[in-house]
Image: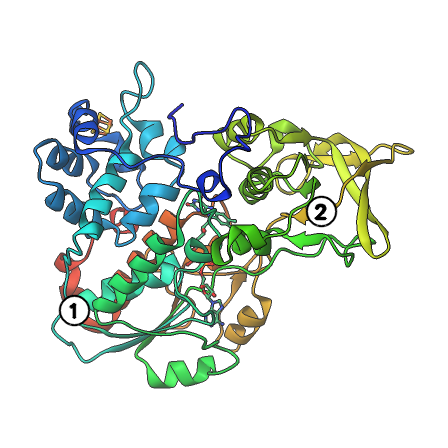
Amino acid sequence: MAEHYKPFKYMPWEMSLEERFQEYHPAYSEREAVVEANRCLFCHDAPCMVACPTTIDIPTFIRKISTGNVKGSARTILESNLLGATCSRVCPVEVLCEGDCVLAHDHKPIAIGRLQRYAMDYAAERNIEFFQKGEPNGFKVAVVGAGPAGLSCSGELAKRGFDVTCFEKREWGGGLDTYGIVVFREPVEVSLNEVKMIEKLGVTIKTNVEIGKDITFEQLVDEFDAVFVSVGLGAVPEMQIPGEDLEGVLDGLEFIEETKVRPLNDIKYGDRVCVIGAGNTGIDCATIARRLGSERVNMIYRRSEAEMPAYHFEYQFALKEGVSFMFLTQPVEVIGEGGKVKALKCRRMDLGEPDASGRRAPVEVPGSDFEIPCDMVITAIGQKKHSHITEKLAKFGIKTVKGYIAVDEKTNRTDHPKIYAGGDCVRSHGEASTVMAVEDGKIAANGIHRALCGEGVKAELLPTHASKR
Ligand SMILES: Cc1cc2nc3c(=O)[nH]c(=O)nc-3n(C[C@H](O)[C@H](O)[C@H](O)COP(=O)(O)OP(=O)(O)OC[C@H]3O[C@@H](n4cnc5c(N)ncnc54)[C@H](O)[C@@H]3O)c2cc1C
Ligand code: SF4
């Protein structure tokens, strides 16, 4: 397994909060980067590159680091992935490029993520601008949502001369990279720098504008030649158990966001915390609580260890951070006293036959209720779909799959000829990640470019996995 995290075996309470929330890995020095780059075999038909959803030419960017051409290395990365700085930090490299590195089995895989970060930091520290806005081609495109999918699509189109306006309902662009990814994995500034880079390409980003409320989808379709919808997903759904409204029950996404937008000293945390759900978001909430100072953090999951959705390396990381796991446990009520959380009532579960997801369904064990004393409950049981948006899009004849926007996967076009979509709002199956959202933005940019400028543009298009299908 690649060493992606640096867990604290014992929580170092003597460290300041700021130190506990610093990026896991210190940046590579020049020497460290060159030594690591020189371990690469520069494979022909490199499996690491095939495993990268954005098809970054990994052997080439690593070779450039090894020869001292770090600027060229950064260009190679950004040519395939405009959000290379974020992806170098947040990508689950263990299951993507590093997992498929030929050295993964016998030796240690090349630290592709850290090398990519080295090249990206080099370019950012020197304010190097690699691309300019393309010669105007007369077409206008609206992008809804400035998360990774929206930024990637906007930037790729601007490079080719499209006049792009990106509408974002929040104060800052970057989507979950800015608001949702734990600060010790990605500092907010890295994401905001990428937003700036996209603006420098000539993209107009209009923040605090919600499409569907401040401007209608009809207006966008009338005014623009194409529309790309990249609205992501919504808040954590309600658990629908008694006591959810008590003080001390928090939405996991809001809890993480606090650590990104507020001084760490101002953030409230419980001494004994129960995190409900065992996905990657739950793990983030649990490790944040530990690093803030919570003494006991229990993750509660109704299925078993084998079914938990978190990556194995995330699970291991949480264990090393002192987080406890309670499997086959279903919360049934949040118990309060004086309006505040006092305990979480749970029921033991067993595993029955596989359900629609293919995983064995949890079945209640009668008479097995018990209470876990706690003063904070954090919910991390997924994200709601934006049904208010899919309802509006249905008026354009756009269909959904399990509540996600349905698209043609080669172009990311919906059932409406002018409307495209990508990112988490279309990901009806498989893992959702930043790098996949970036790739979706590229696929849509290619689709829009081809639809508006004709098949003749094919040669100029960026390689994507979709274009290879
Ligand atoms: C807690 C958490 C941690 C994660 N950690 C990782 C990780 O470590 N690595 C990884 O690869 N992936 C991670 N992911 C997944 C990754 O963040 C997402 O897959 C990715 O951000 C999806 O990009 P997106 O552009 O589709 O959506 P988002 O990032 O959600 O962006 C959507 C944007 O659209 C805006 N918007 C929504 N509705 C409207 C509207 N009507 N009008 C205008 N704007 C609108 C939103 O405000 C938002 O800015 C994590 C996800 C979560 C929830
Ligand atoms: S698979 Fe590993 S060794 Fe081969 S090019 Fe990729 S990083 Fe280098």
Residue sitting at 49 percent across and 35 percent down? 15
Query: In terms of sequence position, does the residue under pointer 2 or pointer 1 come before the other?
Result: 1
Q: Which mark is residue 133?
A: 1
Quadrant holding the N terminus: top left
Estimate how packed mark 2 is, as few (under 14), some (14 to 19) or many (20 or more) residues with alpha carbons within 10 Å: many
Q: Position of residue 245 (x, y in %)?
A: 77, 59
In this figure, which residue is indicated by the disc labeled 2? 377
Q: Position of residue 458 (x, y in %)?
A: 16, 60
Q: Image check: 111 left or right of 353?
A: left
* Residue toward you, 136 or 408: 136
> What distance separates the C-alpha of mark 2 from that of mark 1?
48 Å
Of the residues shown, which amino acid type is indicated by label 2? Val
Q: Position of residue 208 (x, y in %)?
A: 45, 75
Q: Is 134 rendered above or below residue 232?
A: below
Q: Secondary structure at mark 2?
A: strand
Q: Position of residue 365 (x, y in %)?
A: 85, 32
Q: Is 196 rendered above or below residue 210?
A: above
Residue sitting at 27 percent across and 33 percent down? 112
Of the residues shown, which amino acid type is indicated by label 1? Lys
Q: Secondary structure at mark 1?
A: loop
Are discs 2 and 1 less than 8 Å apart at CB? Answer: no
Q: Image check: 112 left or right of 306?
A: left
Q: Image check: 175 left or right of 133?
A: right
- Res. 219 visible in picture: yes
Residue sitting at 39 percent across and 81 percent down? 220
Q: Which mark is residue 409?
A: none
Q: Is 405 rendered above or below residue 397?
A: above
- Res. 45 visible in picture: no
